[in-house]
Amino acid sequence: MSDHTGRFNPYLPLDTCIPDGEPKLFGDRVYVYGSKDEFEDRWCSYNYHVYSAPVDDLTDWTDHGVSFASRRDGLTPDAPEERAVPWCGGLLWAPDIAEKDGKYYLYFCQEDDSEGVAEADTPYGPFVNARRITMNGEPIHGIDPSVLNDNGTYWYTWGQGHCHLARLMDDMCTLDPSTYVESIISHDDGCEGFHEGSSLRKIGDTYCMVYASEYTDAYPNRGGAPTHLDYAVSEKIEGPYVRKGVIVDNTGIDPASWNDHGSILKVKDQWYVFYHGSSGNKQYGRRARAERIEVDEETVTIKQTEMTSSGFAEALDPTDTIPAAVFYKVTSGANLVKKNDAYVITEVTDGVEISWRYFDFSKMPACTLTVHGSIYAEGKITAYANGTEVGSADVHTVMPCGGLSSDIACNLRLPMTDVKIPLANLPARADLTLKFEAANGTAPDKLIMEPETLLFC
């Protein structure tokens, strides 16, 4: 995979949009199972890919290719027919997986609200023999399946608004109706704000539900957009579950951020949260992200983490070439797009701020930051480290008439050039923000610059 893989957030190549990431540990590798955003106007696709990395190096991600698909045109040309879903060739939404007796069971859901399972001899497929999930002899309906192996008993959760629970029987596709619970967590008034994306974990003797949440302090149920992953805990599998807080919130990663979905995993001695963030000023184009988190395993308390640009690492190395695309926050409509095979931040107009978190400047208290990209209008860039100004530089262009409005420039990309910003008094660990300002007399809707990379020297 590309040099970008694993060293930044998003941790997969930028041309890969894998939301709903469910992390699992099989052997000495971490596997991520997610859906796949491929379209401009809808979620997900007709196939899944599986990604994995060794536990000793979470920067080295492997794409195992198409692992499962719902219809022939979602498969590779020589794929066997049995990898298709017999009852529905629709879009595949968020999956999960479980291992039992050396077999791997991939649980999936589709746009018709059907849920199914396919099996393989390896964690990455190919998954075959797709069957529907049934209870009382009838197919169940819902989205976002999750499976917990609780000492050899397999529990299945699914649903939106209300999270349902039942035990999987030995065939791994039939639910035991005697164990069915209609709603172990929900978005009903006064409840825990459950939206979707249930992911059940067990930490010690405590059950921990990770989920996309609508919870707000002012209106604790359907009060907000489900941009954050919350967690709730219970001493019993069937509940009651009590919400304890937020794990991560992807608000600010894109102007159109809407949902989140993911889970937590302990790799060696470090816990991580896997989640996603939108791009392109739309609810789609969701890319896989991860953060280090602190988990008190005795009290099952998870400290809310910040979104960062460094992901699995503690900080970014400023001697590296940093893709501008690994920002954690933008303002005023700026967003990530692909132009001429390069990923740039567009809609950078007057007053836009772009932030990257964190840099390790412990060996580089002063340096020059080179912002590489296309320049469209006269302006200024001011750099801030942990909120304090540490440098600035003017932006110059050869564009006539003071530049182009962002809507005219949307399909145009000028030759790349550099803006050099001398930086001084850098803290050892810094959240870096660049603020872009238009020159006097330049209309505020003029596109100033489309940054592609950052380089410190």
Image: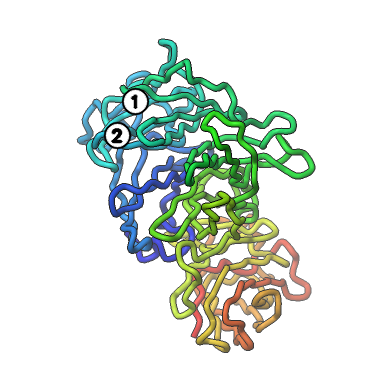
Residue type at tag 2:
Lys
What number is the disc on residue 213?
Answer: none
Front one among 352 and 21: 21
Residue linked to disc 1 = 172
Q: Distance between the residues labelled 1 and 2?
A: 9 Å
Name the image quarter holding the N terminus: bottom left
Front one among 375 and 291: 291
Residue at image location 48% in from the left, 60% down from the top: 9
From what the image shows, is residue 300 above or below residue 120? below
Residue linked to disc 2 = 100
From what the image shows, is residue 333 above or below residue 455? above
Q: Badge 1: how crowded within 10 Å, few (<14), some, or many (20+)?
A: many
Residue type at tag 1:
Met
> x, y (%) of residue 316?
49, 72
> x, y (%) of residue 81?
24, 26
> x, y (%) of residue 116?
39, 25
The numbered mark, 1 or 2, whose residue comes first in the sequence reads 2
